[in-house]
Image (cartoon, rainbow, N blue to C red):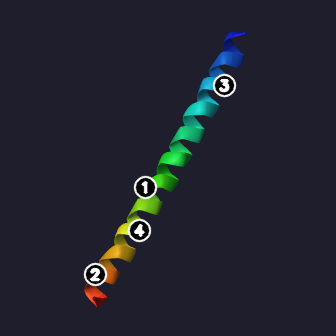
Amino acid sequence: MIVIVEVIIFNVLLILKVRGVVLIIFICLMRNYFQTDNRNN
């Protein structure tokens, strides 16, 4: 029972880490996109 709980917690943390990395990459891409737009304008 304890092992199952640990696996669930590990999976949740892994999913949160993946989402965090994707979110950070998305924000960086959006910042670069807006910066290039401002430079072109």
Q: Which residue is mark 1?
A: 24
Q: CA distance from mark 1 to mark 3?
A: 24 Å
Q: How far is mark 2 from mark 3, CA to CA?
A: 45 Å
**Quarter residue 24 falls in:** bottom left
Please report whichever mark, 4 or 3, sits nearer to the chain's N-terminal start: 3
| Pointer 4 local density, CA inside 10 Å: few below 14, some 14–19, many at least 20 | few
Residue 1 spot, x, y in % from top left: 73, 10
Horizontally, residue 25 falls left or right of residue 9, namely left
The tag on residue 38 is: 2
> Residue 5's x, y, as percent?
66, 17
Q: Nearer the viewer, residue 10 or 19?
A: 19
Under tag 1, what secondary structure?
helix
- Quadrant containing the C terminus is bottom left
Mark 1 vs mark 3: which is more N-terminal? 3
Label 2 sits on a secondary structure element that is helix
Please give the residue where the numbered disc 4 appears in the rendered image: 30
Q: Which residue is mark 3?
A: 8
Mark 2 and mark 3 in contact? Answer it, CB < 8 Å: no
Q: Kindly report which numbered mark, 2 or 1, lies closer to the viewer in this rendering.
A: 2
Mark 4 or mark 1, whichever is nearer to me: 4
Q: For marks 2 and 4, give the one nearer the viewer.
A: 2
Q: Amino acid at mark 4?
A: Met
Residue drawn at point x = 35 percent, y = 68 percent: 31
Callout 3: few (<14), some (14-19), or many (20+) C-alpha neighbours within 10 Å?
few
Is the residue under label 4 in contact with that under label 2 (CB below 8 Å)? no
> Are the residues flagged by discs 4 and 1 in contact, CB closer than 8 Å?
no
Q: Residue 36 sits in which quadrant? A: bottom left
Please identify, in this view, whether the residue under mark 4 or under mark 3 is nearer the observer.
Answer: 4
Closer mark to the observer between disc 1 and disc 3: 1
Disc 3 is placed on an element classified as: helix
